[in-house]
């Protein structure tokens, strides 16, 4: 029985589309798609490279991952990542989150369940350790959203 305070909100549309796309992929296709997402992750803007100390580390990831969030012109959040190109799986997972959540309102980011990715069956293609890092990145994105919601950034 669900908890009375649980709110079942739909995923942001872009994130739902990514989940739906992964659901039908084979293991090999999932790996190929993760690599494609990895290659699509934008480089860190120069202004953030100079201020890397302002970025939040994500210690749940074995690979060094740094995250920065800011409000975009339309009020939605924009997420930036600093992840080595030598870590394509981690970059791909972060790119999925950035693609699915960039432009979302803080409340939308906060409403994403920690296990939203279960229908994607990522465990067919990546290790549990990578999945733990993925959920860690989402948790840090939610912390950033909470800060923006409360005007702390």
Image (tube, rainbow, N blue to C red):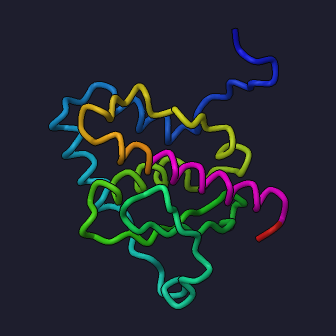
Residue 31, x across and y down, in percent: 21, 44
Q: Would residue 79 appear left or right of 7 to someone viewing this image?
A: left
Identify the residue at the far right of this view: 150
Instruction: Name the magenta segment's main secondary structure.
Output: helix
* Direction from residue 27 to residue 16 in the image, left or right: right
User: In the rendered image of this protein, does residue 11 appear above or below residue 137?
Assistant: above
Magenta includes 139? Answer: yes
Residue 91 image point, x, y percent: 35, 60
| Residue furthest bottom as drawn | 50
Q: Is residue 58 above or below residue 128?
A: below
Quarter residue 108 falls in: top right
Residue 114 position within the rendered picture, expressed as x and y whole percent measured from the top left? 56, 37
Quadrant containing the C terminus is bottom right
Residue at 81% over, 68% down: 152
Front-most of residues 47 and 113:
113
> Is the residue 6 above or below the residue 55 in the image?
above
Question: What span is colored magenta in the figure?
Answer: 134-151
Residue that appears at 42% across and 33% down: 19
Does the magenta portion include 5? Answer: no
């Amino acid at each position: 029985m669900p908890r009375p305070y649980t709110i079942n909100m739909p995923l942001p549309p872009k994130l739902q589309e990514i989940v739906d796309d992964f659901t039908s992929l084979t293991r090999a296709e999932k790996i190929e798609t993760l690599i494609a997402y990895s290659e699509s992750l934008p480089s860190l803007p120069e202004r953030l490279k100079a201020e890397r100390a302002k970025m939040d580390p994500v210690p749940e990831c074995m690979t060094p991952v740094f995250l920065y969030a800011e409000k975009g012109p339309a009020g939605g959040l924009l997420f930036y990542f600093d992840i080595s190109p030598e870590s394509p799986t981690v970059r791909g997972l972060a790119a999925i989150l950035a693609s699915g959540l960039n432009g979302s309102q803080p409340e939308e980011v906060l409403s994403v369940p920690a296990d939203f990715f279960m229908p994607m069956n990522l465990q067919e293609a990546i290790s549990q350790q990578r999945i733990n890092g993925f959920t860690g990145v989402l948790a840090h994105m939610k912390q950033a959203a909470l800060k923006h919601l409360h005007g702390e950034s």
